[in-house]
Each structure stands twice: as structure tokens, then as C-alpha cells.
Image: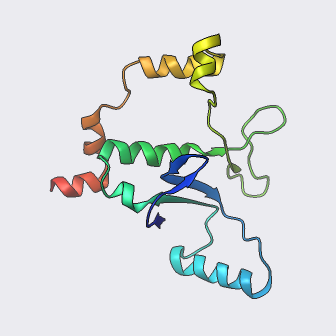
Amino acid sequence: MWASDSFAKKGRHVLGQAEQVMLRAGGWQKARMEQQMHEWFGRIPKFIITLAADYCSQCSDLEFCALVEHELYHIAQATDDFGAPKFNKETGQPVLTLRDHDVEEFIGVVRRYGASKEVQELVDAANAPAEVAHIDIARSCGTCMLKLA
């Protein structure tokens, strides 16, 4: 979905948001929400990703792909008590859930005390060559292909 612009939260600009659809209402209010979802999507989705249109209209293809992928990473397969992937017993489909960021840390703490295991994994990934080159994104994106035609 598109939002007209970003918003500020905890001192940062939010450019995208993944959320699990939960209609926390009753009666007519719930019926209106369900009707709106059916009109927009033809069904009630399990998750919605909302992006700031003001940012997306002016960012590069690489920045846009990174934002979309970031939001998609928030949607993950749930795990059971043993850490194994969780599946719906009736349908066999994966059970999806929202997940937090891999790493949450302050730069000052890392500077003073060093990197935790999770932060070090992020540093190692940042220091490795990118797995997708800038040009590869434009060639693999359907929207970008339309621009090239």
C-alpha cells in the first residue's frame, strides 16, 4: 500500500512498515474494515506493507528495492518450541509472523565495548561484496524492465 508521505517515530523518519492484519473491532466497524480490505485486495490479507510515496517517488531503484526487501524481511516463518519451522496442521502452509530486526545496538556501545556476535555478523556482511550488483536489480525488476522498453 502507499501512504502519501513518511512520518516521524522515535526521532526517525518511517519510510515503510510491515504489519500483520488484525481487525480489532466489532460490529459495523469490523464489517467496514473487512469490506474495505475486500474492495482493495479482493480478500483480507494476512500482512500489509505500506510505503511512503513521497520517498519512493524520488529514491533510486536500489534504494526502493532495499526498502521493500527490508519490509519483507519482517515477515518470517514462525518457529515451534524447538526452533523448527512451524506449519499449519490443517493446511500444511507455513505459519507466518512478524519478526524484529536482526541487530539492535547503539554505535557508541560498539565503539566503546566492541561488537556482540549479532553486530559482528552485520559488520562481516557489510564488509563483504554485495550479492546483488546495482545493475542486476534494474535487470531483474519488472517495473524497471518496463522503463527500459
Residue drawn at x 54%, y 23% as measured from the top left: 122
Give the x, y percent position of residue 39. Answer: 54, 81
Q: Nearer the viewer, residue 55 or 39?
A: 55
Give the x, y percent position of residue 75. Answer: 61, 48
- The picture quadrant where one finds residue 57 is bottom left
Q: Is residue 147 found left or right of 143 in the rendered image?
A: left
Q: Taking 12 as reference, is 50 above or below it?
A: below
Give the x, y percent position of residue 136. Answer: 28, 37
Q: Nearer the viewer, residue 143 or 8?
A: 8
Q: How is the image coloured?
A: rainbow
Q: Is residue 47 found left or right of 13 in the rendered image?
A: right
- The picture quadrant where one finds residue 37 is bottom right
Residue at far bottom of view: 28
Residue 39 visible somewhere in the drawing: yes
Residue 114 visible somewhere in the drawing: no
- The picture quadrant where one finds residue 34 is bottom right
Q: Taking 98 as reference, is 39 above or below it?
A: below
Residue drawn at x 60%, y 45% as measured from the top left: 74
Residue drawn at x 31%, y 41% as measured from the top left: 137
Residue at far left of view: 149
Residue at far top of view: 113
Q: Is residue 126 found left or right of 44 in the rendered image?
A: left
Give the x, y percent position of residue 59. Answer: 32, 49
Q: How many marks?
A: 0
Q: Nearer the viewer, residue 88 or 1?
A: 1
Figure quadrant of the C terminus: bottom left
Residue drawn at x 63%, y 71% as measured from the top left: 44
